[in-house]
Image (cartoon, rainbow, N blue to C red):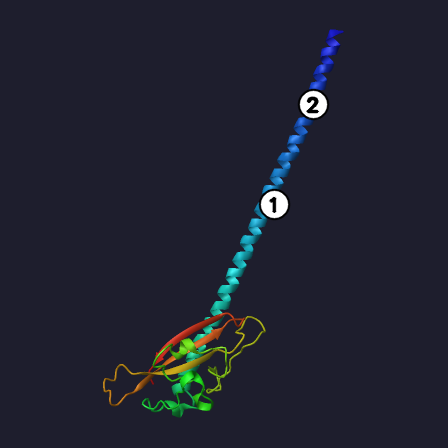
Amino acid sequence: MRYTVSYTLVRASANVRSEKQAGASLIVVLLILIVVSILGVGGAQIASMAERGARNDRDLQIAWQASEAALLDAEFDIHGPGVSKRSAVFTNSKNITAFVPGCTGTGNSKGLCALAVTGKPAWLAVDFTDASKVAEFGAFTDRPFAAGTTGPQPALKPRYIMEPIRDPGNRDLSDLSYIYRVTAMGFGPREDIQAVTQIVFRN
């Protein structure tokens, strides 16, 4: 009789221990599931950030290449090859009458800005998104440029302005000649992605 009672107690103790272990394994599995979920979400965020970074880099490259194209168009505007609609403006490096204060010129003076004597230079003050103050790509050279909202291309045509600055190579103050500072802006697939490049050009 004593033997039977002790045997029953041992079996009851084993059942209690087994139920406790089953509860612990559920908690461990849930913790592992939470850790794996956190790692998965973190991996997805890292992949998303990498994709956004690559897209931003591509968009900035598009804007930079567009601004470089505008500098080249400005060079063609000044001296060709080919005939620019306003090539006569640049034949005499001592005549800067076509350059207008505030970049408010029209016709052959469009995008030609007089050098500011005080305050900000024109390339810092002008709004490049205002097409009335700048020369768009091809406006005077008739060269085509693909732009728009279709595919990864610039949203707007690149544009540029020119300012005459005194030629530092000419030391004769009684007979001034000028060189041209050209500032161009290119756009990425969105208008708010912009790149600015600048050259000083002697005709």
Locate residue 127, reporting x and y percent.
47, 77
* Kind of element beneath mark 2: helix
In which quarter of the view is residue 182 placed? Answer: bottom left
Q: Is residue 80 visible?
A: no
Identity of the residue drawn at 72% across and 13% down:
7
Q: Position of residue 128 (x, y in %)?
A: 47, 77
Q: Nearer the viewer, residue 167 or 122?
A: 122
Percent of width and height locating residue 58: 50, 66
**Percent x, y of residue 139:** 48, 86
In percent of the image, x 38 and y 85: which residue is there? 114
Q: Relative to residue 75, is residue 155 drawn left or right? A: right
Determine the residue positioned at 50% across, 69% down: 193
Going from N to C along the chain, the mark reached first, 1 or 2, is: 2
Q: Residues within 10 Å of mark 1 (few under 14, many from 20)?
A: few
Q: CA distance from mark 1 to mark 2?
A: 33 Å
The reply, left or right, for residue 3 in relation to residue 108 is right
- The image shows residue 23, relative to residue 65, as above or below, that is above
Mark 1 lies on a secondary structure that is helix
Quick one: which residue is furthest to the right in this view? 1
Residue bearing mark 1: 37
